[in-house]
Image (cartoon, rainbow, N blue to C red):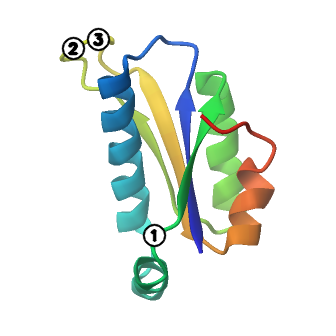
């Protein structure tokens, strides 16, 4: 079981903002998973990776692929209270899900 979080590199988020957006994405996708998947992932150590995303468009495309493969996923939009304009897409979480299936969606991306 694995979860992959893709964070945008093209919008200049600071480290704290990046960490918060990754956390939002991880939790949001986790909440969309079914009970069995959540339990398996949680009991298996909650494996996750953070990957580099190039653009809003890329995150939406990856989300569509995840949907087509039945993977829980969450696109995160910033509230606009600090560094970014309200509604800016910042991150996408794919999974938790079977590691091989998650890798078919995000496996080509570089680690953050």
* Residue labelled with disc 3: 83
Above/below status of 107 relative to 91: below
The C terminus lies in which quarter of the figure?
top right
Q: Position of residue 92 (x, y in %)?
A: 52, 42
Q: Position of residue 61 (x, y in %)?
A: 69, 38
The answer to whether residue 82 is left or right of residue 2 is: left
Asked if disc 2 and disc 3 are in contact, CB closer than 8 Å, the reply is: yes
The answer to whether residue 91 is left or right of residue 65 is: left
Residue in view at x 21 percent, y 14 percent: 82
Query: Is tag 1's residue or tag 3's residue first in the polypeptide sequence?
Result: 1
Secondary structure of residue under mark 1: loop
* Residue labelled with disc 2: 82
Q: How many residues crowd around disc 3 within 10 Å: few (fewer than 14), some, or many (20 or more)?
A: few
Secondary structure of residue under mark 3: loop
The N terminus lies in which quarter of the figure?
bottom right
Residue in view at x 63 percent, y 31 percent: 52
* Residue labelled with disc 1: 46
Residue in view at x 47 percent, y 11 percent: 12
Q: CA distance from mark 2 to mark 3?
A: 4 Å
């Amino acid at each position: 079981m694995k979860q992959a979080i893709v964070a945008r590199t093209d919008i200049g988020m600071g480290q704290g903002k990046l960490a918060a957006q990754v956390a939002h994405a991880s939790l949001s996708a986790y909440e969309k998973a079914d009970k069995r998947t959540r339990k398996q992932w949680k009991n298996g150590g909650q494996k996750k990776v953070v990957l580099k995303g190039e653009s809003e468009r890329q995150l939406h495309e990856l989300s569509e692929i995840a949907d087509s493969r039945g993977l829980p996923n969450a696109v995160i939009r910033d509230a606009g209270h600090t560094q970014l304009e309200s509604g800016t897409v910042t991150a996408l979480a794919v999974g938790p899900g079977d590691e091989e299936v998650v890798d078919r969606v995000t496996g080509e991306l570089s680690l953050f």
